Amino acid sequence: MTTLIITANDAEQTLINYLKKVFKTLPLSQIYRLFRTKKIRVNGKQITDFKFRLTENDKIDIYESNLLVNYKPEKLPKEPPIDLVYEDDNFLIVDKPHNLVVHQPYGSNLDTMVRYYLQQKNPKAAREQTFTISHQYRLDKLTKGLIIYPKHKITQNAFYEANQNGSIIKKYLAICKGQLTKTLDISGFITHVEDEMKMIFSMESYEQSKSCTTIFTPLFMTKNFTLIECQLITGRKHQIRATLQFLNLPIVGDTKYGSTITSPQKIALYAYYLGFNNLTGTLSYLNEKEFILKELIPNLINQMKLEKW
């Protein structure tokens, strides 16, 4: 018999996902056979549902001989340091630089940089954890700004629910060509256009389009440019970029969405603000907290005055 105890880091995973990580060399068909032949018990109760969700301190007994527990944390190459904005026992907030992908199956990316940071900080916790730490949401490669990284599955689920409920406030800054003189609350529809490999915003709904809403507030203006705060009410892919193109206010450097200004390896779009409200449960301590890249606004205003992109 093999006995496994669920730690806080591994809680809230499904039983099948946990076993796949613990018995990495065991064929998936044999893991399913353990369920079919009723050889798995959790806290003394026979479990045949492979989607059974685990909680902290659950005791798993597997009545099968010759099972090899061979979970090992991924071996990561040395990664450059992350720009850490905030960290506690539940999650991190990282400031992603321009021209860095959040995730990809090979090469350097923000996900692996965060995992490397955590492995170096606490090797023991990294060895014991089967939950794969990953971003809560993505930013485009050419966009800079704040990204949340939950440390546990239970925290990931809590953030997902909070995002669905509108309890996470996300604001961006964008330098745009043209002038915006008043706040606009824009609702419409966004559609992926395969031939152009981009999203298109329109006021009309089309097949497979999704509704979206963004609030645009001008913060500073020159003769040719406007610094705009963009608050996401929905979170569609390229929502801000496509909507600003529709408004004839393309983001500086965003040639994919209408900019005639080239800015190598970046666009002038920054996820600069995260706020939290009406959170419950494990994340309630974050209510009324704000995380802001405060230095960005004066820096961007200086760029606009000099038109240095």
Image: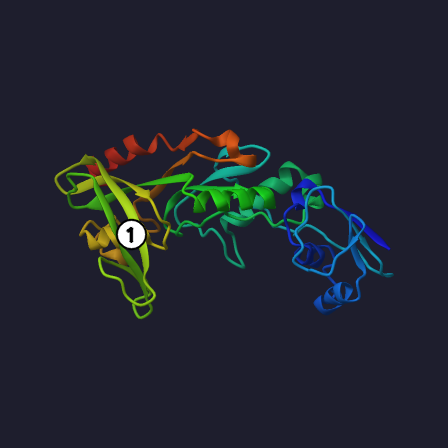
State whether residue 244 is above or below residue 38: above
Residue at the (19%, 51%) spot, across then down: 247
Residue 203 in view in this figure: yes
Residue at the farthest left position: 223
Residue count near mark 1 (Cα–Cα under 10 Å), binned few <14, some 14–19, many ≥20: many
Question: Which quadrant holds residue 105?
Answer: bottom right
Q: Which corner quadrant holds the N terminus?
A: bottom right
Q: Is residue 29 above or below residue 296?
A: below
Type of amino acid at the residue the image marks with label 1? Arg
Quadrant in the rendering for residue 294: top left
**Seen from this angle, which residue lies furthest front?**
45
Helix, strand or loop for disc 1:
helix
Q: How is the image coloured?
A: rainbow
- Would residue 259 be seen by someone viewing this image from the given angle? no
- What residue is rendered at 21% in x and 55% in y? 246
Q: Is residue 45 left or right of residue 226?
A: right
Residue 238 screen position, x and y as percent: 33, 54
Q: Quadrant of residue 215?
A: top left
Give percent across and percent down for residue 224.
14, 43
Q: How many marks?
A: 1
Left or right of 219, for residue 15: right
Q: Position of residue 22 (x, y in %)?
A: 73, 55
Q: Which residue is pictured at 81% across the width and 61% down the height?
A: 39
Residue that carries the numbered disc 1 in the rendered image:
241
Image quadrant in which the C terminus is located: top left
Q: Is 182 situated above or below 196? A: above
Residue 17 percent coordinates (x, y): 66, 57
Q: Nearer the viewer, residue 199 or 289?
A: 289
Q: Residue at x 37, y 55 (%)?
A: 237
